[in-house]
Amino acid sequence: MVPELQFTDQSRFRLAYIFSYNLLQFCGHTWILANTVARLLTFGHDALADMFYSVGLVTSLCQLMSFLELFHIADGIEKAKLLPRFIQVVERNSIMFTLVTLEEVQSKPAVCVQLFLWNILDLLRYPHELVRVIDKPSPMMLWARYTLWIPIYILSAASEGYTIYQVLLDLWPPESHSPTAIAKSSSSSLEFFLTLAACLSILTLGVSVTVRQLLQERQQQLDPPNKKKKKK
């Protein structure tokens, strides 16, 4: 009887933990999106000047917390594919580190679009995860999570690529491509440029792998049971 009680207490703790985590992420991304939309409606284009300053801290905390999701999947608390989540977490945190490091990029429109798309994706995912802890999600929520999520993710990945491209242009403007300018450039700037260029290449490969996995998840979650049996 004792081991059974311990297992029950452990299961309750795990459910309470994953529910609290998803709720915290949902509240954080809701605040970021509401703040972003409110500032854009109030100040218009002028809001871009300090948009990252306003929401950057909370965004960074939410993205850093997302590393815990890799342990959730590995431990079995969350049922999801590890590879797509790993790619997503690494992509986002790499871009956030770049944005925090380079203040001159923070006010670009591409950064605002990137943050907006990230929040839309997470506000489709975390409510689904919250409901799944306590009940079965509705068909509309399943459709939004596994169908609508895919094209928005592709747009977000394209925005990530464009954001990296903007960073590359700031670090390495066209006039600096001459041999004289390359010779004068610092080794640290060159290394950072090569790192971002590698990230851009890895991003393309990662997106193709992630989209394939997402399509497989969509088929598993949304296909009728009878159709699955026929395929087998």
Image (cartoon, helix red, strand yellow):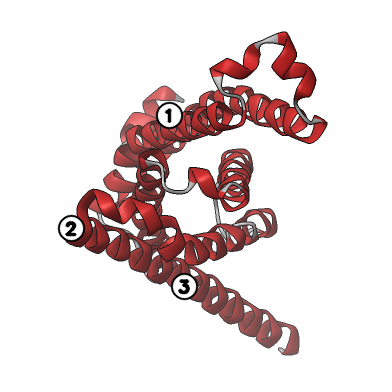
Is label 3 or label 1 in front?
1
Say what amino acid the circle numbered 1 marks: Ala
The reply, left or right, for residue 147 in relation to residue 172 is: left
Q: Is mark 1 on a helix, strand or loop?
A: helix
Asked where in the image residue 198 lies, by quadrant, the reply is top right
Q: Distance between the residues labelled 3 and 1?
A: 27 Å
Say what amino acid the circle numbered 3 marks: Leu
| Precedes in sequence: disc 1 or disc 2 | 2
Is label 1 or label 2 in front?
2
Q: How far apart are marks 1 and 2 (CA)?
A: 25 Å
Q: Which of 149 and 98 is in front in this view?
A: 98
Q: Is 69 placed above or below 118 here?
A: below
Residue 147, x across and y down, in percent:
31, 38
Q: Is 28 placed above or below 163 here?
A: below
Q: Name the residue under label 3.
A: 24
Q: Nearer the viewer, residue 59 or 221?
A: 59
Crowd band around label 3 with a 10 angstrom C-alpha radius: few (<14), some (14–19), many (20+):
some
Is label 2 or label 3 in front?
2
Q: Mark 2 points at which residue?
A: 41
Q: Which residue is drawn at 41% across and 23% down?
A: 231
Q: Nearer the viewer, residue 229 or 176?
A: 176
Q: Which residue is drawn at 59% across and 41% down?
A: 91
Q: Distance between the residues labelled 2 and 3?
A: 26 Å
Q: Which residue is drawn at 55% across and 57% down?
A: 63
Residue 41, x across and y down, in percent:
18, 58
Say what amino acid the circle numbered 2 marks: Leu
| Residue 139 appears anywhere in the view | no
For the N terminus, the quadrant is: bottom right
Residue 96, x across and y down, in percent:
57, 50
| Dot label at residue 158 | 1
